[in-house]
Amino acid sequence: MRERVQRFMYGRYGFDELSKSSLAVTLMLMVISMLFRNRLIYLVSLVLLVFSYWRALSKNIGKRQQENRRFLSIRYKSTAKWSKWKERQAQKKIYRFFKCPGCGQTVRVPKGRGQICITCPKCQVEFIRKS
């Protein structure tokens, strides 16, 4: 049986991160549709399920890899923004953040120092702010 499945999948793309993510969203949507008895959510989950299996069984490997690369890029950017936001929230009690008027670089300075002259590490522009 395993050999038959391997022969069937030969030359096909298989499951990647995009397919796995769409299956996870499908599962969540199906649970939500059962809880709220909403047919529209159920139909959307079925479409996502078909999409995920269509991608896995596709023989156009180059196109599927390109789609997965785009998905991973978008996911990485959103994860990086979230991490940066969380880190800034954790440092908010100790530091103040200012944007450099010259280049837009974010500069971090300690709180409670009164008016200070801040030098941008990127473009060396000096500006005065109250910390």
Image (cartoon, grey):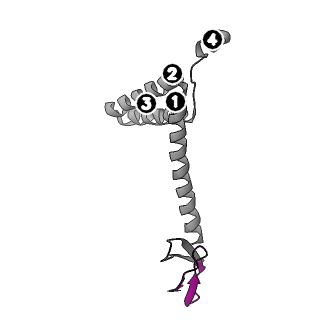
Gap between marks 1 and 3, in whole Å? 16 Å
Q: Residue 48 has which mark?
A: 3
For the residue marked with disc 2, what is the amino acid? Ser
Which of the two marks, 2 or 3, is nearer to us in this view? 2
* Disc 3 crowd, CA 10 A, few/some/many (<14, 14-19, 20+): many
Q: Which residue position holds label 1?
A: 64
| 129 falls in the magenta region | yes
* Disc 1 crowd, CA 10 A, few/some/many (<14, 14-19, 20+): many
Q: Residue sitting at 36 percent across and 34 percent down?
A: 41
For the residue marked with disc 3, what is the amino acid? Leu
Q: Residue 7 has which mark?
A: 4
For the residue marked with disc 1, what is the amino acid? Arg
Q: Which residue position holds label 2?
A: 58
User: Contact (CB < 8 A) between labels 4 and 2?
Assistant: no
N-terminal of the two: label 3 or label 4? 4
In x, y percent, where is residue 26?
46, 32
